[in-house]
Image: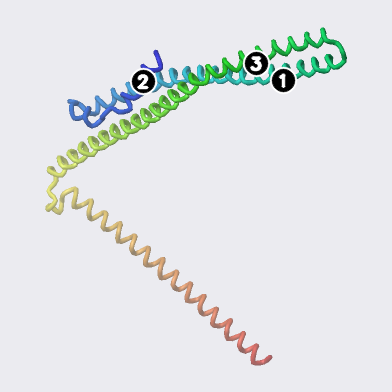
Amino acid sequence: MSKQTILGRVTQLAKANINALLDQAEDPQKMLDQLIRDYSNNIAEAEEAVAATIGNLRLMEQDHQEDVEAAKEWGGKALAASRKADELRSGGQAAEADRFDNLAKVALGRQLQSEKEARTAEPTIAAQTEVVAKLRTGLDQMKAKLGELRAKRDELVARARSAQAQNTMMDAVKNIDVLDPTSELSRFEDKVRREEARAMGKQELAASSLDAQFEQLDALGDSAEIEARLAALKG
């Protein structure tokens, strides 16, 4: 799969209009389930393809860095050979000096070649970097769309269950005479009211006990204050 094909698929899927698709569906929940499966599969395939694209880009970047370092290294060798030639020439060793100058020329040629290779790779690396950024953005959008699909599916399921529960409840209510004191509903209501009354009684009892404890604490505080004042008078 080419990079352009990957990018096209990612962009198309990321821009899909879910609401429009659902409007045309006979069974929205079933369609959402299928879309979720398709999206999950497409995302997995796209992630593999994007990973391969990123891997190729990293290899190109490594090669470029090696060319840059090689150019720097050959430049250093050329400088060293040239200086050695100058040193030999000043010492009267012209033939040996020429040999080192030739070595410097060879090193400069290698430097020039490495620099050319580095410059040639730079536009391709820049283009690949832009493609990778777009692919990553597209993947993020696809994952967001998948989250939207799942949320809509969950919402539909919850609404369907709620509607089913309401219908079940309404069918049950139809079979109960809410005005009949002997009905199951009335008896259950009486039971609930008795439980509520017991709870209120326990709350009042607990509150009164708590008030008594705080009154006792206040009395102890007053007694302590009186003792303190008496001690101050005697002092």
Q: Position of residue 139 (x, y in %)?
A: 40, 26
Front-most of 120 and 55?
A: 120
| Secondary element at image label 1 | helix
Q: 214 above or below 99?
A: below
Q: Are marks 1 and 2 in contact (CB under 8 Å)?
A: no
Q: How is the image coloured?
A: rainbow
Front-most of 233 and 72?
A: 72
Q: Are marks 3 and 2 in contact (CB under 8 Å)?
A: no
Which quarter of the figure has residue 142? top left
Left or right, residue 188 beside residue 102: left
| Secondary element at image label 2 | helix
Front-most of 171 and 204?
A: 171
The tag earlier along the polypeptide, 3 or 2, is: 2
Q: Position of residue 191 (x, y in %)?
A: 26, 54
Q: Tell me which amino acid carries mark 2.
A: Asn
Number of the front mark, 3 or 2: 3
Q: Residues within 10 Å of mark 3 (few under 14, many from 20)?
A: many
Question: For residue 111, which numbered disc appears in the image?
Answer: 3
Left or right, residue 180 beside residue 90: left
- How far apart in space, not on screen, are marks 1 and 2 (Cα)? 51 Å
Q: 48 above or below 147?
A: above
Q: Residues within 10 Å of mark 1 (few under 14, many from 20)?
A: some
Q: Tell me which amino acid carries mark 1.
A: Gly
Measuring 56% from the left and 83% from the top, which residue is drawn there? Answer: 223
The tag earlier along the polypeptide, 1 or 3, is: 1
Measuring 34% from the left and 20% from the top, which residue is drawn there? Answer: 8
- How far apart in space, not on screen, are marks 3 and 2 (Cα)? 46 Å
Left or right, residue 106 beside residue 125: right
Q: Which residue is mark 1?
A: 76
| Secondary element at image label 3 | helix
Q: Which residue is mark 2?
A: 42
